[in-house]
Amino acid sequence: MRVLRFLGYLLIVLGLFVAGLAFWLWIDGRDLSAPAGQLWFELDSAGLNTVQAVVQRYMHPAIWDDAIVPLLQKPAKWALTVEILMLLVPGILLLLIGRRKRRRYR
C-alpha cells in the first residue's frame, strides 16, 4: 500500500509541476494557442530533439508518430490540460486505492 501512495503522491506532484509550468507560460505572455510542439521548440529545441531520439530509439517509433506527434500538434493549452489530467487523475486514484484502512474499535 505504501508503494501505491508513493506513486500517487509522485503523480500529483508531477501534475502540479506541469500546472505551474502552464501558469508560468501564461504569465510570461507565451501564446498558448500555438501548437505545443512549436512552443516546446522555442523554449528548448535540444530537449525536444532528445526526447524524440529517446522515444524512437529505446521505446518504439510508433509511440512518437502515433501518440506524441498528434499531441504536439494540438494547441499548447489543450496539450497541457490533457497532461495535467493524465497525471492528477491516476495520482488521486492511487491515493484512494492505497489509503490506510481505519480500524474499528468496539
Image (cartoon, grey):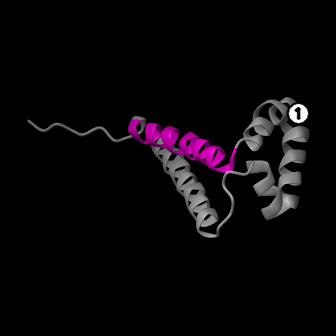
- Residue found farthest to the bottom: 28
Q: Label 1's element?
A: helix
Q: Is residue 4 magenta?
A: no
Query: Disc 1 residue type?
Result: Pro
Side of 7 relative to 44 (left or right): left
Direction from residue 70 to residue 8 in the image, left or right: left
* Nearest to the observer: residue 18 or residue 106: 18
State the predominant SS element of the stretch in magenta. Answer: helix
Task: Identify the residue at horizontal 44%, vertical 42% (top origin).
Answer: 92
Determine the residue positioned at 80% across, 30% down. Answer: 66
Residue to which mark 1 is pinned: 61
Q: Position of residue 45 (x, y in %)?
A: 86, 59
Residue at figure coordinates x 55%, y 48% from the top left: 11
Image quadrant in which you'd find residue 93 = top left
User: Image quadrant for the N terminus?
Assistant: top left
65 shown above or below 15: above
Instruction: Provide residue 29's location: percent of width, then percent of height.
Output: 65, 67
Q: Which residues are magenta?
A: 75-96
Q: In terms of depth relative to the viewer, which is nearer, 50 or 66?
A: 66
Image coordinates for residue 33, horizontal then vertical, percent: 67, 51
Which quarter shows the C terminus?
top left
Label 1 CA crowd tier, 10 Å (few <14, some 14–19, many 20+): some
Q: Nearer the viewer, residue 2 or 73?
A: 73
Please count the marks in the image: 1
Q: Is residue 22 left or right of residue 12?
A: right
Locate residue 104, reporting x and y percent: 16, 36
